[in-house]
Image: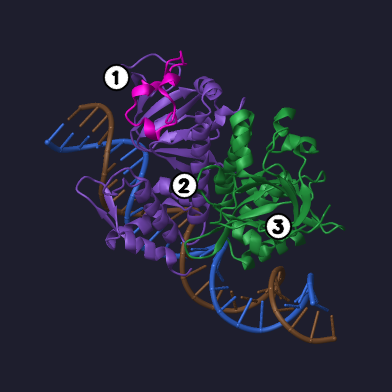
Chain colours: A green, B purple, C brown, D blue
DNA sequence: CGGTAAATTGACTGCTCTCAATTTACGTGG
DNA sequence: CCACGTAAATTGAGAGCAGTCAATTTACCG
C-alpha cells in the first residue's frame, strides 16, 4: 500500500495500488455505479488508485494518456488557455465527477489541464476499460451521459452566474456554489487563492483581494479555528438580488 | 405538406409532416447518423418536422414536453434566467445540434428556453423514441454523447473567450465564432440584435451598439447587398492578441 | 532566520453602466 | 402610398466600478 512506483504517468502522485472497483465504498457515486457484479469478473485493463498532492497535475491540455479520472475525494480545477495567453478556470470537479471524458471520442485529446486544488484521491480508468464495458453494459453509457450533463449544467451556471455583473456579486455566487458543492456537512469551505478566484470570475487578483477582505470584515465570511471558512448564506443571497 | 395542424406543442410552428428519417438528406449530420436501415423499420414514436419562424419558442425552461429537437437549418438561442432576473444566452445551436437532451434523464425538465434566432427547420424526436433505439442500437448512445461533448466544448469556449476581458475583444471573438460556425460557404453572417449580443457577452446594449458601430465604420464588418455581413478575419484576430 | 511568493493596500486611469434624448426601422391601419 | 405608433438602435454626458502599476506587508518554505 502507498508504495511509490516507476510509472510514465501521474508521476507526482502516490500510487495506492490497483482499485477493487467491486468493493469500492463509494461506488454509488462513481462512474461504475449501476454495474452488476459480473462486470468486474472480466480481465479489465487495470484501474489504479492515486493520491495527488495539492498543486499537482492529473493531466495536461493537448495530451492523450488514454485514461479518464474519477474523483473520489478533494477538488480539481480544469484550466483553459485564453487567446491572449492568460489562464482561466472553467470548472471545479468534486467527488463523483469524471475528468477527461472527451477521450472517449477516438483521436481526441484532453481539452483542459486538470490541477489538484486540494489533496485528491482519484482513480485512473483506462479508456479501453470503459469501451469494453460499454459493449456489454449499456448502463455505463447512461453514467457517462449523466456526468457530461452534470458538467454541462455546471458550465451553464458558470456562464450565467459567474460571467456577468459586478465582481462582488460573482464572488458571492462563487462562495454559495462552493458551500453547496462541498461534501462538508457544516458547509464550511476552503477558500481558493485570490489568483484562482480571479481566474474563475474573470477579475484581477487585486479586485478579488479587496472584495474578500471586505467580506471578512463584514462577517459575511468567518474564519473558523480549523482554517475553514463559514459563509453567511442570507447575506450572500441578498447580494445576488440587488439591482446592478 | 406544410399543413398547419391542431397540436398541443410547437403551436407557433408550421408542421411539415412526419419525418422520414431513413431518407433524411442530412442524416450524416443528425442524431440518427450511424444507425442501420433496420433501425427505422420498427414502429417508432413519431418524429415530426417543423418550421419555426424567427422569434418563436421551441420549448420553455422548466417544461417537460418529452421531446428532443434536432436542428436541421437555422440557429436557436438557449436562454437562462440569472438570479437577478435578467436573461442570458448560454449557447447558440446550429444544424446537427440537439436541444433538450437533458430530458433523457428521467424526471428532468428543460434547463433553458430555446428561441429561434432565424427561421428554423427542426425535427421533434420523442424521448421514448430515443430510449427505444438505445436498447437496440448502442450507436445512438455515442451520438448523444458526442452532441453533449460538443455542447460542453462550446460552453467552455463561451466561458473562456466571451466571459473575460474588454467588451471589444469579446465581441470580436463572437464574430469569429459565428463566422466559423455558419453553414454559409462565404462565411457571411447574420448579425444578432444588440440586445442578444449583450445577453451573450454580458454587456449593456448601449456598449454593444457603440462597439458594433465602430467596427462597421472601420470596415472590420462590411454589410453586403443581401443584408449579410462579412468580417475582416485578420483584423478581428489581431484584436484578440492585444494586451488588456 | 532569510528568501521568495502571495496577499494587501493606495493612487490613478480607463472602461462600462446608467439615464436620457434623439434617430431610425418597421408593421399597422387609413 | 402615406401617416402613424411602437420598438429598437444610436449617441451623449456623467458616475462608478475595475484594471494597472507600485509599494508594503504577510505568509510560507527551506
Q: Position of residue A88 (x, y in %)?
A: 57, 59
State the residue in front, A82 or C12: A82
* Side (left or right) of A88 relative to A216: left
Q: Residues within 10 Å of mark 2 (few under 14, many from 20)?
A: many
Q: Are callouts 1 and 3 both on one chain?
A: no
State the residue in front, B207 or A155: A155
Circle 1 or circle 3, nearest the eye: 3
State the residue in front, A35 or D8: A35
Q: Residue at x 36, y 14 (%)?
A: B5
Q: Residues within 10 Å of mark 3 (few under 14, many from 20)?
A: many
Query: Which residue is disc 1 drawn over?
Result: B2
> Magenta residues?
B20-48
The label on residue B71 is none
Q: Residues within 10 Å of mark 1 (few under 14, many from 20)?
A: few
Q: Chain of mark 2?
A: B
Is A174 placed above or below C26 here?
Answer: below
Query: Which residue is disc 3 drawn over?
Result: A117
Circle 2 or circle 3, nearest the eye: 3
* Side (left or right) of A165 relative to B205: right
Cα–Cα gap, marks 2 and 3: 32 Å
Is B155 placed above or below B40 here?
Answer: below
* Side (left or right) of A64 relative to A195: left
- Please give the count of numbered marks on the rendered protein: 3
Query: Which residue is disc 2 drawn over?
Result: B199
Residue A210 picture quarter: bottom right
Amino acid at each position: 500500500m502507498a508504495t511509490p512506483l516507476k510509472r510514465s504517468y501521474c508521476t507526482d502522485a502516490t500510487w495506492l495500488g490497483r482499485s477493487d472497483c467491486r468493493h469500492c465504498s463509494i461506488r454509488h457515486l462513481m462512474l461504475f455505479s449501476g454495474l452488476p457484479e459480473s462486470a468486474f469478473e472480466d480481465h479489465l485493463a487495470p484501474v489504479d488508485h492515486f493520491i495527488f498532492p495539492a498543486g499537482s497535475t492529473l493531466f495536461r491540455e493537448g495530451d492523450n494518456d488514454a485514461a479518464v479520472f474519477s474523483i473520489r475525494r478533494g477538488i480539481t480545477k480544469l484550466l483553459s488557455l485564453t487567446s491572449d495567453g492568460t489562464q482561466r478556470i472553467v470548472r471545479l470537479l468534486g467527488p463523483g465527477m469524471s475528468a477527461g471524458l472527451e477521450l472517449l471520442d477516438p483521436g481526441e485529446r484532453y481539452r483542459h489541464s486538470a490541477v489538484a486544488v486540494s489533496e485528491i484521491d482519484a482513480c485512473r480508468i483506462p479508456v479501453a476499460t470503459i469501451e469494453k464495458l460499454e459493449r456489454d453494459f449499456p448502463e455505463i453509457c447512461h453514467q457517462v451521459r449523466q456526468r457530461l450533463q452534470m458538467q454541462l449544467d455546471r458550465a451553464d451556471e458558470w456562464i450565467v452566474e459567474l460571467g456577468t455583473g459586478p465582481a462582488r456579486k460573482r464572488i458571492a455566487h462563487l462562495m454559495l456554489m462552493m458551500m453547496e458543492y462541498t461534501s462538508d456537512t457544516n458547509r464550511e469551505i476552503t477558500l481558493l487563492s485570490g489568483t484562482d478566484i480571479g481566474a474563475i470570475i474573470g477579475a484581477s487578483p487585486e479586485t478579488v483581494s479587496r472584495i474578500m477582505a471586505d467580506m471578512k470584515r463584514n462577517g459575511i465570511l468567518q474564519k473558523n479555528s480549523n482554517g475553514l471558512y463559514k459563509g453567511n448564506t442570507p447575506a450572500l443571497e441578498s447580494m445576488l438580488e440587488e439591482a446592478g
